[in-house]
Amino acid sequence: MKKEKMKQRIFDSAKQIVKREGMSQLNVRKIAKLSDCSLGSIYNAFDNFSELQLHINADILSDLFLALSKVIENGTLAKKPMREIFKDLGFAYIEFGQKNTMLWKSVFEHFPQKEIPKWYKKRAQEGIYAICAKIADFFDLPEKEVKHMVGFYWTSIHGMSGILLNKKMEMVAELFKEDYLELYVEYCLNGLFKRETVSVT
Amino acid sequence: MKKEKMKQRIFDSAKQIVKREGMSQLNVRKIAKLSDCSLGSIYNAFDNFSELQLHINADILSDLFLALSKVIENGTLAKKPMREIFKDLGFAYIEFGQKNTMLWKSVFEHFPQKEIPKWYKKRAQEGIYAICAKIADFFDLPEKEVKHMVGFYWTSIHGMSGILLNKKMEMVAELFKEDYLELYVEYCLNGLFKRETVSVT
């Protein structure tokens, strides 16, 4: 098997295990079994285990950014107002987590023990800043302001995803009744689009 | 050693390990070493390992609820307006996570494989509903409405905690410049206290 092809097969098998069982359950033995490669060829393909983990997370991030970029593209094509596009983005983010719970958890709940390498940071930054740039461009807003909006909105939508995906919500179901998801996104949007509102107090 | 005393010592040692290393690094051997108890006495004290894990998480939740309750008590004693009390609650929640990162992660990022026992659900509910009741009582609001507000606010503040504690923020530092924490809490409050604002669009 060619080297690149084998590397891809090892990578795909590893990602599949993470998707099914979570990053904490990934080990070289499982990858070897699923990819039908020897332990030696895995260590040949990736310098070390944490490098493989980082590449998996970078790949998941790319999938997420792709899903969000599509939402912006569709929204701008349909000439939706900004608030609607943010709303769609919020639902797309939550949906990505619901469909890929273990992958989502791998990216966002993996507590880095070591310094994160520059290439990974660069990838994460480029993905999110590309989204900011698209919004800034279409609505002709200063990029700085859009980054600020995206930072706030991402963080609050992220909270809903974390609560939902870790099944903490069902425990306190009384807090989240009747269309909670719709309502939650509305609240976040109300906080975000404060420019549209004036205080009456 | 008396049975209850030994159980407490095992529990305290286990919680200490979780605090230092995280729940995923907890195992019976480490507990035995730190508590100076035999493996047998650990299995005698707790029916099984996941029961011990749940008791640790319930204990962490109690600590968190205690910290939040104090904020409400101090706020109501000082006759602060509701928005100020929510603001203090938000900062207290984030601060608890920052001071007890591994404990926070253990409670909120532990993905339950099995059905969560009723006693645990009851504890989680009682803690959060007691907070709702205090707010409802002091501000003379319907409890249903307060539960709704607490649900939204908790979730969005939770998002900031998750991003912050998992060190995802430094990667996209440009999104979170200058007093981001203060600003973030303000945004969430703006979404929460929408009754105080009217739309001008």
Image (spheres, coloured by chain):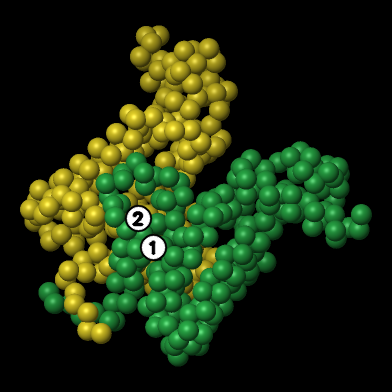
Chain colours: A green, B yellow
Q: Residues within 10 Å of mark 2 (few under 14, many from 20)?
A: many
Residue A6, horizontal then vertical, whole percent: 85, 54
Q: Residues within 10 Å of mark 1 (few under 14, many from 20)?
A: many
Same-chain check, marks 2 and 1: no
- Chain bearing tag 1 is A
- Chain bearing tag 2 is B
Residue B124, horizontal then vertical, whole percent: 31, 38
Tell me which residue sits at (36%, 37%) in the image: B60
The residue positioned farthest toward the right in the image shown:
A1
Q: Is residue B22 above or below residue B8?
A: below
Tell me if I can see residue B63 in this picture: no
For badge 2, the amino acid type reads Thr
Tell me if I can see residue B166 in this picture: yes
Give the number of the disc on residue B165.
none
Foreground residue, B57 or A121? B57
Residue B8, horizontal then vertical, whole percent: 38, 20
Q: Is residue B52 left or right of residue B118?
A: right
For badge 1, the amino acid type reads Ser
- Separation of residues labelled 2 and 1 (CA atoms): 7 Å
Tell me which residue sits at (44%, 53%) in the image: A162
Give the number of the disc on residue A156.
1
Mark 2–mark 1 CB contact (< 8 Å):
yes
Q: Is residue A164 left or right of residue B89?
A: right
Please, what secondary structure does the residue beneath circle 1 have?
helix
Tell me which residue sits at (51%, 74%) in the image: A71
Give the number of the disc on residue B155.
2
Foreground residue, A183 or B25? A183
Residue B109, horizontal then vertical, whole percent: 47, 45
Q: Indicate the quadrant containing the N terminus of chain B: top left, top right, bottom left or bottom right.
A: top left
Foreground residue, A157 or A145? A157
